[in-house]
Amino acid sequence: MNFENTVTDLLARGVPVRFRARGDSMHPTIRCGEHLRVVPVEAAAIAVGDVVLARHQRGLTAHRVVRISGRRITTRGDNCSQDDPAFTVADLVGRVDAAERDGSTRTVHSRKFRQARGWVRRVLTHFSRRQQRLAAAVLVIWQSVL
């Protein structure tokens, strides 16, 4: 059984998988050589901004969802200028939820979360302590929503 079949089979059985990423198409979010953790996911739970693992002609690819149109999903690497060919939900394999670099694991957040985190950081640098606590609370709320 080859890598793609093994990963697809494990995720279909509800077993998360971990493997080493190759390529720079998701740089700087995911770097070549990092370990990715992919979890099983239902197509209905996917949102624009999620990083998903899907079957493409070139093989399994972990890219960010940029558009969902009915049962078709379009992705693009963060470091790419063009969208990937759209695929059907049948080709969706799982969602990338974490990446490991140099022994530390970090969550791979949706683009909306990263934008909200940037907003909070800007607020934290320009306002009083009371306003900083409010901004931190807003970030926690955003994280639970996204």
Image (cartoon, rainbow, N blue to C red):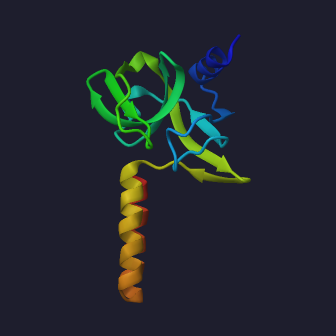
At x 62%, y 41%, the residue is: 32
Residue at the farthest bottom position? 128
Residue at the farthest right position? 103
At x 59%, y 45%, the residue is: 31
Residue 36: image location, x then y, percent: 62, 39
Residue 97: image location, x then y, percent: 54, 42
* Picture layout, residue 38 above or below residue 128: above
* Picture layout, residue 48 above or below residue 69: below
* Picture layout, residue 85 above or below residue 65: above
Residue at the farthest top position? 1
Residue at the farthest left position? 69
Image-based side of 39 in relation to 67, left or right:
right
Q: Is residue 146 in view from this perspective?
A: no
Residue closest to the eye, 40 or 126: 126
Residue closest to the eye, 69 or 24: 24
Residue closest to the eye, 61 or 49: 61
Residue 41: image location, x then y, percent: 49, 30
Residue 44: which quarter of the image? top left
Image-based side of 130 in relation to 34, left or right:
left
Q: Quadrant of the N terminus?
A: top right
Residue closest to the eye, 8 or 101: 101
Q: Is residue 65 in view from this perspective?
A: yes
* Picture layout, residue 53 above or below residue 51: above
At x 47%, y 50%, the residue is: 109
Image-based side of 118 in relation to 103, left or right:
left
Residue 120: which quarter of the image? bottom left
Q: How many numbered dots are placed on residues in this image?
A: 0
Residue 87: image location, x then y, percent: 37, 20
